[in-house]
Image (cartoon, helix red, strand yellow):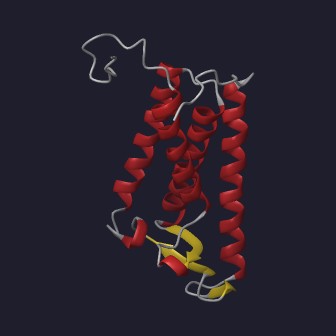
Amino acid sequence: MAFSRNEKPIRRPLLTFGVVGVFWLALDQVVKAVERHSMTVGSTIPIIKNVFHLTYIRNSGAAFSLFSGLTWLFFLAGIIAFAAMFLFWRLKKPSTVLPVVGSALMSAGALGNIIDRVVSGEVIDIFDARIINFAIFNVADIGITVGVVMLVVWLLFFEDHSGIEKGHPMKVPTR
């Protein structure tokens, strides 16, 4: 499969990053505020019965409540994610849609979940995809997941690796 490496650059990538990030963080926090004020913990609203529900839970762990109670670990992971994004922007200076929007979504999602952990020691989750028996998740989690996918796609298919110096561990062999 051939992909064009001639992606059109965004005119103001840092501004785009900021606008997308602030929008996604605000959306996450608004959804969580509405959930806190209109539902009780454990309540569920079927949107499509046994397929998709809105279910209010508080999660002190990761997906599927793994590692519950290790709030400090998830806070630390969020800080590391921000440091990685800062380093990514310093080294790569992204200027196209996939890395700019992907890193904004990922950063906003991490910040949304960090805010929950700092304020209440738990993350507020709502989206309950029962048809696949998946973990209940939130807007921040969607941003993290979509952001990671966008960055991986960019790194695998669009990022130019031809300038990497010989012997570098990220060197892509040429034939």
The residue lying at 51 percent from left, 35 percent from top is 1
Nearest to the observer: residue 109 or residue 9: 9
Nearest to the observer: residue 164 or residue 65: 164
Q: Residue furthest left?
A: 167
* Tally of marks: 0
Would you identify the image quadrant in which residue 140 lies?
A: bottom right
Percent of width and height locating residue 25: 66, 51
The residue lying at 56 percent from left, 38 percent from top is 103
Check the picture and name the quadrant holding the C terminus: top left
Task: Tell whether 13 sits left or right of 99.
Answer: right
Task: Tell whether 83 sits left or right of 27.
Answer: left
Would you identify the image quadrant in which residue 31 lies?
A: bottom right
Question: In the figure, 80 relative to 88: above or below?
Answer: below
Nearest to the observer: residue 133 or residue 41: 133
Percent of width and height locating residue 129: 56, 76
The residue lying at 50 percent from left, 45 percent from top is 148
Percent of width and height locating residue 157: 50, 32
Question: In the figure, 155 relative to 62: above or below?
Answer: above
Would you identify the image quadrant in which residue 13 lies?
A: top right
Task: Tell whether 72 sits left or right of 159.
Answer: left
Question: In the figure, 149 relative to 71: above or below?
Answer: above
